[in-house]
Image (cartoon, rainbow, N blue to C red):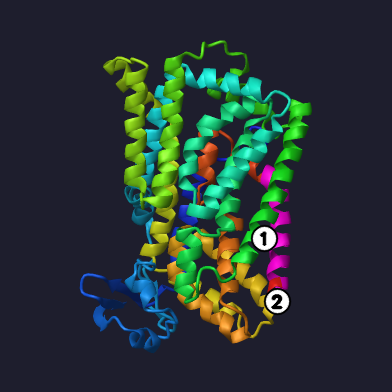
Amino acid sequence: MKNIKFPTAQTILLIIAALVTLLTWLVPAGKYNTLAYDSASNTFIEVAKDETKTLPATQATLDGLSIKIPLEKFTNGDIYKAINIPNTYRELESKPQGLSDFIKSPIKGIIEAADIIFLVLIIGGLIGIINSTGAFDAGIAWLARVLKGREYILIILVTTLIAAGGTTFGLAEETIAFFPILIPVFLAAKYDALVGIACIFIGSSIGTMCSTINPFSTIIASDSAGINWTTGLPGRIFMLLSCLAICIFYIMRYAKRVKNDPTKSIIYDQKEQIEALFGDKKDQTVTFTFRLRLALFVFALCFLVMIIGVSMLDWWFLEMTSTFLVGAIIIGIITQISESDFVETFVKGAADLLGVALIIGIARGVTVIMADGLISDTMLFYASGITEGMSKGLFASVITLIYAGLSFFIPSSSGMAVLTMPIMSPLADTVGIGREIVVNAYQYGLGLFYLINPTGLILASLAVVKVGFNKWLKFIMPLFIVLIVFTLLVMTVSVYL
């Protein structure tokens, strides 16, 4: 039994894909009608089964379809995806997915996730270039000396800053880039790689879970529920500060234990492997020359430009990927790397993250199977009926848990919002509470399960650092349970305030 190893991330996802394929044979196929706004013709397009209808873009049309969303939310671009129309669910002819569909799903997923996959590969190339210059080693050695005796500041700073990115503009996929950059810093501070993973991933998770002005979750979900995004904002700010404090305390407690006794690390058996992978930079004596400082400045500037672009300039994966590519070229010029060495180093750097890219594609393939098997809307339909006749407090807790479950099938925050909110938010009216409670339940449920959701980003994140999912579960489960209990308590109390 000792020789039995926990499966790799790729194998876990393929097992999940196989189970979901089996699920398409057991769960009835079904779909809601969808409504999308066409700005070119200023009309609504309703898709019902195989029929497409054009409807006037008026509030009367929305009211007639029981969609309690102001017309301007569509016309000003706040809701830019097709939404599900309430009370239109219908069972369809079953579309069970077979062996051929299962085999094709990873390929389809890789094609669908090409934007984020290219981002990861280009970031890998950039990291390969910056590592080859020695600038990163010199910078980390300098930082380790500066923080000596105050390493805990690193935990607070990284977790808080990444949570700030999550709560404001949905910093999530982009954090893949931070692992190979920050893990050596945590190793130099005498922590283990799990501390670095936790600060980055948990920071992002809590930030997006308690989104305040994030357009990809809070704003689009509130718009889809027909309420102003500022409704319920004080409660989300309270949750953000509370959950962030809980998480930082938990990480620091584990970090202190590891620092005092490295054998207490959950991944102690991988200590040498991880240090060999990322390097133990604390004793580096690389001279921090002007060229290296300038290269490191350009490297850091890439991430600053990315954050500004995503949060203020409407950038997405194409622009982000281009930024990192240009950054790699500029660093190559600054450090006078020859053209042939640049290409070879860049390709090797990209290859180091190829496994991560494949995990992202296979995870997307799971959602492809569900979409092709027409079971996602069925899950939503049955989930929406569970809360019938519940008290206010019980409703708030159960709807949060329902969203946690749905996030396995619909891991995209914006996709979850537009598909579920028109169906779920009216349920709040039936129990006499504000629709912001459903918006909060959507965010908290999605965010909580995100911490362990294998169809999300956790497996890809762990793959960067070569840490197994079983070890992450061992680390995160006590915190996960505390956060669930705290969240359900807050949700239950909030409906009576």
In terms of secondary structure, where does tag 2 sit? Answer: helix
- Give the side of residue 195 with respect to residue 344, left or right: right
C-alpha span from label 1 to label 2: 19 Å
Please state the horizontal and vertical placement of residue 241, each as a whole percent of the image. Answer: 67, 54
Circle 1 is placed at which residue position? 238
Q: Quadrant of the C terminus?
A: bottom right
Q: Nearer the viewer, residue 191 or 40?
A: 40
Does residue 307 lie above or below 51 as drawn?
above
Circle 2 packing at 10 Å, graded few (<14), some (14-19), many (20+), is some
Q: Nearer the viewer, residue 373 or 400?
A: 400
Residue at 53% x, 17% y is: 138
Could you tell me the amino acid type at mark 1? Answer: Phe
Question: Quadrant of the rendered structure where residue 63 is?
Answer: bottom left
Question: Quadrant of the rendered structure where residue 278 is?
Answer: top right
Circle 1 packing at 10 Å, graded few (<14), some (14-19), many (20+), is few
Question: Quadrant of the rendered structure where residue 372 is?
Answer: bottom left
Q: Nearer the viewer, residue 477 or 311?
A: 311
**Magenta stretch: helix, strand or loop mostly:** helix
- Look at discs 1 and 2 and give the one toward the viewer: 1
Please state the horizontal and vertical placement of residue 324, each as a whole percent of the image. Answer: 37, 35
Residue at 64% x, 65% y is: 235
Circle 2 is placed at which residue position? 393
Query: Does residue 280 show up?
Result: no
Mark 1 or 2 closer to N-term? 1
**Picture mark count:** 2
Please state the horizontal and vertical placement of residue 249, each as a whole percent of the image. Answer: 74, 44
Q: Is residue 439 magenta?
A: no
Could you tell me the amino acid type at mark 2? Answer: Gly
Please state the horizontal and vertical placement of residue 200, each as a whole percent of the image. Answer: 58, 41
- Whether residues under marks 1 and 2 lie with C-beta atoms below 8 angstroms apart, the answer is no
Specify start and end residues of the magenta stretch as a single range: 474-493
